[in-house]
Amino acid sequence: MAGPSKVQFPGQKKQRMRARGTKRASEGVRKRLEKNLAALLEDPHARMPTVAYTIKRARKDPVQRSLKECAKVIAKKNDRKWLGKRMMRRRGDGVARALAGSLHAAHDDERSMVAVFDHPIFGSSSFVRRGVGKPTQMVAFQNFVNPRQRLLTWEEHARNGWWFFSLDDGIVCTGNEPHPPEGWIEGGLSDAPMKFSKKEGVYCSPNAVPEQTDGLHFVVGEATVVLDEEDLAGVAEEESVARSVALRMLPPRLSDFAEVQWNWRPEGWPEGKPLPEDTQEKVDEVIDAWLNLSLTDSKLTKALRKALCRNLSEGCVIGERWWPMEELDSMLESINGSAPEKEALQLVFTEALKNGGLDVRGDGSFEELEEDVLRLEETSCHANLVALWPEWGDLILEKIYGITGDDAEQIIEKQTKRKQGFGAFLKKMDAERKEHLMMAKFPWQEGDMEGLCGRADALVRKARIDGVGSTISMAKKGRDALDKALGWAWINVHERAESEGWHFDSDARDKGGDWVPALKTLFEASEILIEEGNVDAYVDAMEAFATRSGASDFSSPQ
């Protein structure tokens, strides 16, 4: 017998429509088949498509040839012997062969064993297999009441460019051009996963109204269908209005003649401003995918919005919001994050936009663009910095924190691997920058003076960076008599002698007490140094402290 037939659907791999063996027919199946076959035998002409196109050269018209051969079979519909021979003839028209086999089955009294047709899109049915005709064609003739399956008779012609539309009462062939007949769209909508109502001549989904400008406007011929986005989102995962309509025709290519209008724009997009041409092309690709059955209703709105926002070629866009390029600051204000994070992003964006644009994706990657556009999928500073840091971290460290060279490379590598929250990371970097800038103001660095003056300088710097409280424990842990005397002087300068004095002996008190005025002057000079940059005052104060304490390690700064 003939092998199973094939149909290729847009957006899908080739699917094999298969009659999966035979089974013993139940009483219900037998009664249904008896009814269908009796109707076929009574009026086989009703199973033939209505021709709704101008016939130019009938001899070269494959549909006309099939109809002519079918007419010969219909003329012999009661001649079982002739039908038996015709259904086994491998040469000649395949549609006529399947019709002969089905008419022969209509004369049989024995239908206990039936073949099974099962397909994820066209559904399942039982049929009586007679002759070598294609199973799909016999399914179509014997289950003509099914508006989808009845089209399978003409699948080969459809693949060769002929259009067939299934209405409630039969099939219409419109030739090589798709011209949906009147009343056809209603049948497809009746199969849809949502209920439609006709309002003011427009077919509306449950939450749609004829005059609404948002949502999806689906135009087929003279018919307009309005689909509300909320209704689309609520459709089951594998369902689709487009599929319900498209499967009422062969080939199921709605994109060849249907028009879809979708007027959604991101927040902030100027009213009346058309989309860039390349952006509209990407949106049209998504619409074509839906019309060609490779995208379901529940995913349609999200896919459309993503295609639009992720392919805008001007301005700044985050998620589903848009700003003109001159409002970059306003865009940054809308991003979730700390001030240091926003400062870092602003630096990167400003630098990158000098030579084009940036597309920062939610998967942690980015692409530099030729267009002057900034596109961000994520609305948090951290997510965007994660993507940009490996490439732009050196710019951030140099321009904001003054860190370059090997130090910068080590910080970039460590943060890239660790992926610490950028809020905490940059806050720490900012604190270290302030410490670095403060330390740079002091005339001596650690190790320049290694005696009493060096210890006094260390206490002052520590107090200015981390606060006086952090130095009290240092002051109490003197290693020798001079250290202890310095500690006593230090706690007196900061009025901690009453609470911490018990740590010091009388020798430290006697010696250190004489240093208090000079040490206090040194500490006050450090404030002038930090706020005004007056180095001389601090050097003079340190020299005075050395004279008063007898320190021998004082040296003029380099």
Image (tube, grey):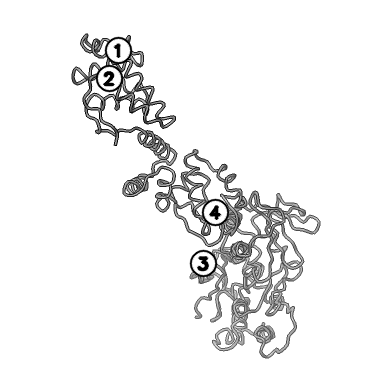
Q: Nearer the viewer, mark 3 or mark 2?
A: 2
- Frontmost of labels 3 and 1 is 1
Between discs 3 and 4, the one toward the N terminus? 3
- Viewed as shown, does residue 272 lie left or right of 399? right
Can you tell which mark lies on residue 475?
Answer: 2
Question: Which marked residue is nearer to the observer: mark 1 or mark 4?
Answer: 1
Residue 237 x/y as whole percent: 56, 54
Question: What type is the residue that disc 3 sits on?
Answer: Arg
If the image is split into quadrants, where does the C terminus sit?
top left
Q: Which mark is residue 301?
A: none
**Horizontal placement of 5 versus 541: left or right?**
right
Residue 24: assigned label: 3
**In terms of secondary structure, where does tag 1 sit?**
helix
Amino acid type, mark 1: Glu
Q: Residue at x 31, y 22 (%)?
A: 471
List the residue tagged with mark 4: 375
